[in-house]
Amino acid sequence: MSRNPANSNEASGDLCSLGSVRRGLREMVTPHATPESVGEIELVAHEIVMNALLHTPGEVYAVIVICESEGMRRLRFWVEDCSLHRPSLRLIELWETRGRGLWIVDHFVDRWGVEIAPNGKSVWAEFSLDGYMKSDPPFNLLESGAEILRGVRWRLR
């Protein structure tokens, strides 16, 4: 299931590892995105990592890549875990204190989804760094032949 970018990092394996992912992501993305976009990307990454650490057993990996294809730069962030449970948007009541993470993800990204593999799943989110719109046709960064400009992988647990 794992796709290995050039740089790999180890994190603490608990919720404290969110900080190292956010710092690394911010350092990598800042030269390529607006300050507002960096904050949105960081928030989405936080939500996806948090869900994996709280709701799945076993190993968890986070990966970010920045690619360029046909003059467009795009970012894809994903978290791999060993659970086969497919997360989905669900209706929540106003008084509920949990359950908003995927709504946050859905609001800020150009596209997100879940890929199931025999040994787990990958929850991913894509962002345009050059004005990509949700109405554009689907585009998979990793299957398009796009050039990977930067990539980092964290082992979280």
Image (cartoon, rainbow, N blue to C red):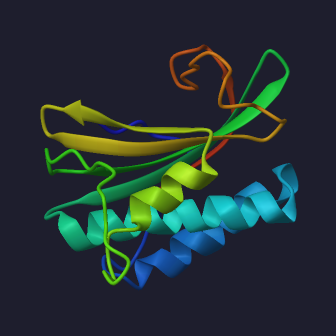
Name the spot of residue 102 as percent of width and height, x first: 41, 57
User: Looking at the picture, does residue 42 appear above or below residue 115?
Assistant: below
Name the spot of residue 19 as percent of width and height, x first: 53, 80
Query: In the displayed image of the protein, which residue is found farthest to the front?
Result: 94
Q: How many marks?
A: 0
User: Looking at the picture, does residue 70 appear above or below residue 108?
Assistant: above
**Residue nearest the observer in this picture, 125 or 21:** 125
Residue under the point 80% across and 26% down: 72
Residue under the point 29% across and 63% down: 52
For the C terminus, the image quarter is bottom left
Residue under the point 51% across and 61% down: 104
Residue 94 found in image quarter: bottom left
**Residue 33 vs residue 114: left or right?**
right
The answer, for residue 155, to whether it is visible in the render is no
Name the spot of residue 33 as percent of width and height, x first: 83, 52
**Residue 79 vs residue 139: left or right?**
left
Residue under the point 51% across and 44% down: 125
User: Looking at the picture, does residue 57 appear above or below residue 93?
Assistant: above
User: Looking at the picture, does residue 33 appear above or below residue 140?
Assistant: below
Name the spot of residue 70 as percent of width and height, x first: 80, 15
The answer, for residue 71, to whether it is visible in the render is yes
For the N terminus, the image quarter is top left
**Residue 98 vs residue 146: left or right?**
left
**Residue nearest the observer in this picture, 88 or 47:** 88
Residue 127 found in image quarter: top right
**Residue nearest the observer in this picture, 104 or 141:** 104
